[in-house]
């Protein structure tokens, strides 16, 4: 029986953060006792030259590998099977995932199949595998998803048209790498969106109903680092210090939510993603201040702590409710500065609000929001975000006359 006095923490066996981290891969291969890699990535990262940076390290150290670069966003069962077939055919015995969430998710799926067999659909749910997966070296290329840190992955079942969420300790990365050299080529819009995803992970982990001292510490420092460096990482992509700060921020935010939970921002953002393919980080950034306002009466002291953690704002001596308002306004200002679009600039259509509200409440992340929301609450959050964006645009147009 589960003892509620004990908290189990989940994190990769090893982590490297900082410039030049990828050069250390061979050292960790030896300790894992592995020989041949399946490199899992996508065509975009091939073209950008990111895969070559890692391939050069493997070549220099005579590590045999084969590359699977056909991962697509929202990877399907077909993609997982294709990658796994190549893994078997080439007698690989570990995985090197290079990418944002999608390639790392595919590597997690292949890792589980490699040691547990069967069909990936068998593993939908929590802790469905019985054996540790094949070792994964997860090399993160976007400072956002936290996929290199977490024990979750998502695979789309195209036949049933559903996203299967797997939560499984056996797919944790053996080695997680956040190397800013691999992130300097990220375009500003992607830097902004993935950075806001990291901020949302930290804020939701800090405000949710299952946080711990471990997740709190990681979350609040992640928030401070995003407030300090996301603007600079977006505007000056080659600034290694800003990129390194964002590596730390996204890693800490990933640790925080992986060891606590998320909340209503993600529950609603998943609907915008499902309905209109709104990029995950953009959807989160749009919704975050409005969900914080919804949570404010019940989470005033905690939102105030977010205000106090903000890098360039002096909130000393303010009452909690005032410091909390600073937190929300600072996040709005950050989104504006890094040019996150308004909800009215996305394919969002108000007529879909009732369906999205209903589905958001069924999303697993909604259960971890500190306050239980009603369908009307979610509808109001979406419509507030929508009308606020329209008003902001009008204000900006008047200013530019
Ligand atoms: Zn997220």
Image: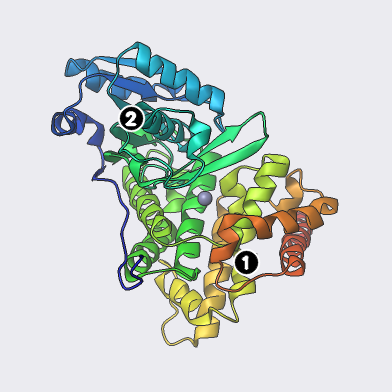
**Image-quadrant location for residue 384:** bottom right
Label 1 and label 2: CA atoms lie apart by: 41 Å
As drawn, 157 above or below 225:
above
Q: Secondary structure at mark 2?
A: helix
User: Does residue 56 sit above or below 147 in this rendering?
Assistant: above
In the rendered image, the vertical position of residue 136 relative to residue 299, given as above or below: above
Quarter of the image with the C terminus in it = bottom right
Q: Which mark is residue 291?
A: 1
Q: Residue at x 56, y 67 (%)?
A: 369
Q: Secondary structure at mark 1?
A: helix
Indicate the quadrant containing the N terminus: top left, top right, bottom left or bottom right. Answer: bottom left
The percent coordinates of residue 382 (x first, y second) are 73, 60
Which residue is at a point 74% across and 47% down the rendered structure image? 345
In the depicted view, which residue is nearer to us: 243 or 103?
A: 103
Most extreme residue toward the front, as rendered?
1
Q: Position of residue 248 (x, y in %)?
A: 33, 51
Q: Earlier in the sequence, mark 1 or mark 2?
A: 2
| Residue 29 coordinates in the image, percent (x, y) | 18, 29
Residue sitting farthest toward the right? 351
The residue lying toward the viewer, choosing from 102 and 251, is: 102
Vertical arrangement, residue 193 with respect to residue 206, above or below: above
Q: Is residue 119 left or right of residue 26?
A: right
Identify residue for label 2.
Answer: 115
- Graded by Cα atoms within 10 Å as few (under 14), some (14 to 19) or many (20 or more), the crowding at tag 2 reads some
- Along the line of sight, which residue is nearer the eye, 229 or 98? 98
Q: Residue at x 72, y 61 (%)?
A: 385
Q: Nearer the viewer, mark 1 or mark 2?
A: 2
């Amino acid at each position: 029986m589960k003892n509620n006095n004990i908290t189990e923490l989940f994190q990769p066996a090893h982590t490297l953060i900082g410039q030049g981290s990828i050069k250390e891969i061979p050292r960790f291969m030896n300790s894992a006792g592995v020989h041949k890699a399946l490199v899992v990535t996508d065509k975009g990262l091939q073209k950008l030259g990111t895969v070559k940076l890692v391939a050069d390290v493997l070549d220099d150290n005579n590590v045999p590998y084969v590359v699977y670069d056909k991962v697509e966003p929202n990877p399907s069962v077909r993609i997982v099977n294709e990658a796994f077939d190549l893994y078997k055919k080439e007698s690989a015995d570990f995985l090197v995932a290079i990418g944002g969430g999608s390639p790392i998710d595919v590597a997690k799926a292949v890792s589980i199949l490699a040691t547990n067999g069967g069909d990936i659909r068998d593993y939908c749910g929590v802790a469905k595998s019985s054996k540790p997966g094949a070792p994964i070296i997860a090399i993160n290329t976007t400072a956002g998803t936290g996929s290199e840190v977490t024990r979750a992955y998502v695979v789309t079942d195209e036949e049933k048209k559903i996203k299967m969420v797997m939560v499984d300790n056996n797919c944790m990365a053996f080695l997680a790498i956040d190397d800013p050299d691999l992130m300097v080529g990220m375009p500003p819009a992607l830097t902004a969106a993935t950075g806001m995803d990291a901020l949302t992970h930290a804020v939701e982990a800090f405000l949710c109903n299952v946080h711990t001292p471990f997740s709190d510490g990681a979350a609040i420092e992640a928030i401070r680092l995003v407030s300090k460096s996301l603007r600079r990482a977006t505007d000056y992509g080659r600034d290694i210090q800003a990129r390194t700060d964002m590596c730390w921020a996204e890693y800490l935010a990933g640790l925080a939510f992986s060891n606590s939970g998320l909340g209503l921002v993600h529950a609603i953002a998943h609907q915008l993603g499902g309905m209109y393919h709104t990029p995950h980080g953009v959807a989160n950034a749009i919704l975050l201040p409005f969900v914080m306002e919804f949570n404010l009466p019940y989470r005033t002291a905690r939102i105030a702590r977010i205000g106090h953690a903000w890098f360039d704002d002096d909130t000393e001596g303010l009452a909690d409710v005032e410091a909390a308002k600073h937190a929300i306004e600072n996040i709005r200002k950050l989104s504006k500065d890094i040019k996150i679009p308004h909800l009215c600039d996305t394919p969002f259509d108000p007529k879909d609000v009732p369906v999205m509200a209903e589905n958001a409440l069924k999303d697993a992340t909604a259960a971890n929001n500190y306050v239980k929301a009603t369908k009307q609450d979610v509808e109001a959050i979406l419509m507030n975000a929508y009308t606020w964006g329209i008003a902001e645009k009008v204000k900006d147009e008047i200013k530019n006359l």
